[in-house]
Image (spheres, rainbow, N blue to C red):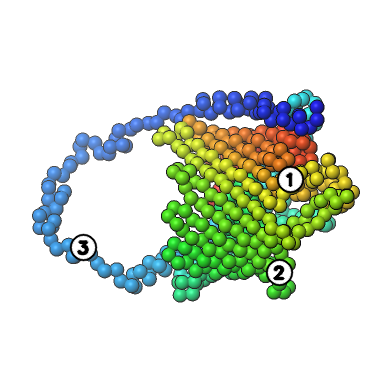
Amino acid sequence: MNNKEFQIKHRGVTDKLIIGMFTLLFFIGGTAFPQEIATDEDSLFGADESTEISTDEDNLFGSEDDMFSDSSDLIEEVSDDLMEDLSTVLLTSDSGVEIGGDFFFDLSADWKGLDPDDLSGSDISDSLSLDLGATLFIDARPDEDTRVFAKAEITSPFYTTTGPDGRKFEDIVTITELFTDFNWDNQVFFRAGKQTVNWGVGYFFSPADLLSLSRIDPEAPDAELDGPIALKINYPSLLNNYYLYTVVPEEVESYSDLTIAPMVELVFGNSEISLGAYYQYNKAPAAMTTITSAIGDVSVYGEGYVSYGSDKTFVIDDGGITTTTYDDEVFLKGTVGASYSWSDDLSNYNLSFSGQYYYNGEGYKDSDIVNVFETPQLFGSGIVSSEPSEIAAFLMDSGMHYGAANASWREMFGSDFSLSLFFIENFSSLSGMIKPTISWSGMDNIDISLSLSRMFGDAGEEYAVAGSTAAVSLGVSIGGTSF
């Protein structure tokens, strides 16, 4: 039986491990009901019978003279000075500086390489990892027209190493944001410095996000993305917004290194449409559009992307495996998605769902050409090394059609247990992953999660580099908090 037949046979079956795990999860969730609620009548309804109750109608409702007196005394004109004082209170603070952040201490134990068809013969590798750190921010507002904001992330291990792949100081302390806000006559608003810039609206995939320096991780789609150093100019007009970004790379040397990116956001009823463009010398110019709206209780969104040429290097078979670039072809990308949440009156069922389809015009129709096992010449030609991390990066976005979805049931039956199911697939290579997770938050400042990841597809494909395998992960978060 070849790999394709093996994959098709087992994808229709959702492995015995996953079925067994779900049975256990629902059994646990179904038996975890909320405790009995105390109903102290005095606490609910107040004073006892000895409390004297006034029945004087004038005291309760006021006299006729009070009711029909001149109401002009009740209204005072708000002075301009009072409005200015209110603006100062809202936009500044006594100290002029606010400091805060988040702390995290996460431990994860992983068991990889499980063979769902032969557990006893599995080549299992185990590991334990620590993620300790914090994010810190300083928000300074010396007056209502000026703001300075700085944010940094500190992560373990807290030491440096030598060598080309050594850990450097910037790997320990990372500046994620550093900018100033100011305005001209409260009509045009400026932001200068390193800032988050998210043009896209997609949840798992976002081809329209032209300026972010990092991409969405579909397994952690809510994580903050790394943004560029830029000057943003914003002109709001009624409900619409007009933007102009000038992006400056950290190692700028000439005007040709700058990127110009205009964008407009337009509101039509309950829908919002954005249009934007991107230009940098010697880079493929691109344009994007997004739309967000709602159909009943379902939130829907879409993105479109077009570029003239591509900055990607493509692998081709031209009588031999080699690479090429395309500077004069049009490339299209697009995505559509939807999300929905529902909860009953007793909060026994807190359900949510998100799903998205992604078309990648820069992907390969035939995924075998980038499969390192199907095309071993990739190693010999120096296109990719044998390092697992480099192979994973090489295969990223190699397909043309993708899908991802996540369903969650938070606080099942009002308990401390939550259940989620994540799915992603590269439909071009028929490789993907399904991942059920159960989590428990029954203790203050401690969260525990257990997940089973099932990778499927031919060995060497994007989501199944090692073939069809499974992995179990146990995670503990201790003392995570915001301050």
**Answer yes or no: do the residues labelled 3 and 1 have beta carbons within 8 Å?**
no
Mark 3 or 1: in front is 1
Mark 3 or 2: in front is 2
For residue 34, the mark is: none
Residue 254: x and y in percent read 72, 74
Nearest to the observer: residue 142 or residue 238: 238
Q: Is residue 33 above or below residue 401?
A: above
User: Could you say whether the residue bearing mark 3 is in a helix, strand or loop?
Assistant: helix
Q: Could you tell me if residue 61 is visible in this image?
A: yes
Q: Is residue 30 above or below residue 139?
A: above
> For the point 44% across and 29% down, which residue is it?
35
For disc 1, the marked residue is 365
Residue 437: x and y in percent read 61, 35
Left or right of residue 87: residue 116? right
Residue 93: x and y in percent read 46, 65
Nearest to the observer: residue 125 or residue 464: 464
For disc 3, the marked residue is 74
Disc with the residue nearer the chain's start (2 vs 1): 2
Q: Is residue 353 above or below residue 156?
A: above
Left or right of residue 326: residue 358? left
